[in-house]
Image: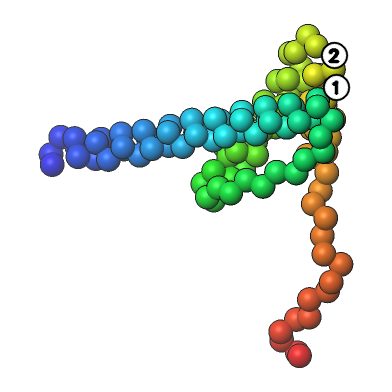
Amino acid sequence: DIDGSEENEKESKISRLYQAQLLKDHAMGYKIASLMMEHAIAGKSDRYMVIAGFGHLKHYTGVPDCVHGYLRQEALLTPDVQHRNVALDLLLRLSRPPIRSSVQRSSISGV
């Protein structure tokens, strides 16, 4: 194709797919953050397991960053002091590094 319309159409499809993925990431992030806020305000100490593909977990664009963003928004912009405190507490809990296994794995080479 001389005018490049086939290439533009391909880029347009990829762009729409990317936009749809971002929308889904934000929808999932908003729902998770909302559930976390609701449950924390009710005094529940729930844990959550989110099953999502790698594309939805990528750093800076995925669901975890959306959850952080919505909780930060709640902590900074909500006039309700209780909601701000709950959001800050949730952010602090999410910011802790994961627990690592204390079991040492032996190296395959030299065994």
Residue located 15% across and 35% down the image: 3
Give the quarter of the image for residue 34. Answer: top right
The residue indicated by pointer 2 is 81
Amino acid type, mark 1: Asn
Q: Are marks 2 and 1 in contact (CB under 8 Å)?
A: yes
Q: In this view, does 76 lie above or below 31?
A: above
On the question of residue 58 being in view, the answer is no
Q: Where is residue 68 in the image (x, y as percent from the top left)?
A: 70, 32
- Residue 94 position, x and y percent, is 78, 39
Q: Is residue 20 left or right of residue 52?
A: left
Compare residues 108 and 7 and report the one nearer the observer.
Answer: 108
Number of other residues with Cα within 10 Å of mark 2, as a class: few under 14, some 14 to 19, many 20 or more: few
Element at badge 2?
helix
Residue at left 73%, top 20%? 74
Please, is residue 25 above or below residue 57 in the view? Answer: above
Q: Nearer the viewer, residue 94 or 3?
A: 94
Q: Quadrant of the N terminus?
A: top left
Return the residue nearer the eye: 29 or 36.
36
Structural distance between the alpha carbons of marks 2 and 1: 6 Å
Choose top left, top right, bottom left or bottom right for residue 93: top right
Circle 1: element type: helix
Image-based side of 70 in relation to 5, left or right = right
Residue 29 visible in the current orientation: yes
Q: Which three-letter amino acid code belongs to the residue tagged 2?
A: Val
Pointer 1 local density, CA inside 10 Å: few below 14, some 14–19, many at least 20: some
Which residue is outermost to the left?
Answer: 2
Q: Which disc number belongs to residue 85?
A: 1
At 85% from the left edge and 17% from the top edge, which residue is drawn?
82
Colouring scheme, one of rainbow, by chain, secondary structure, one colour:
rainbow
Identify the residue at image location x=75%, y=44%: 47
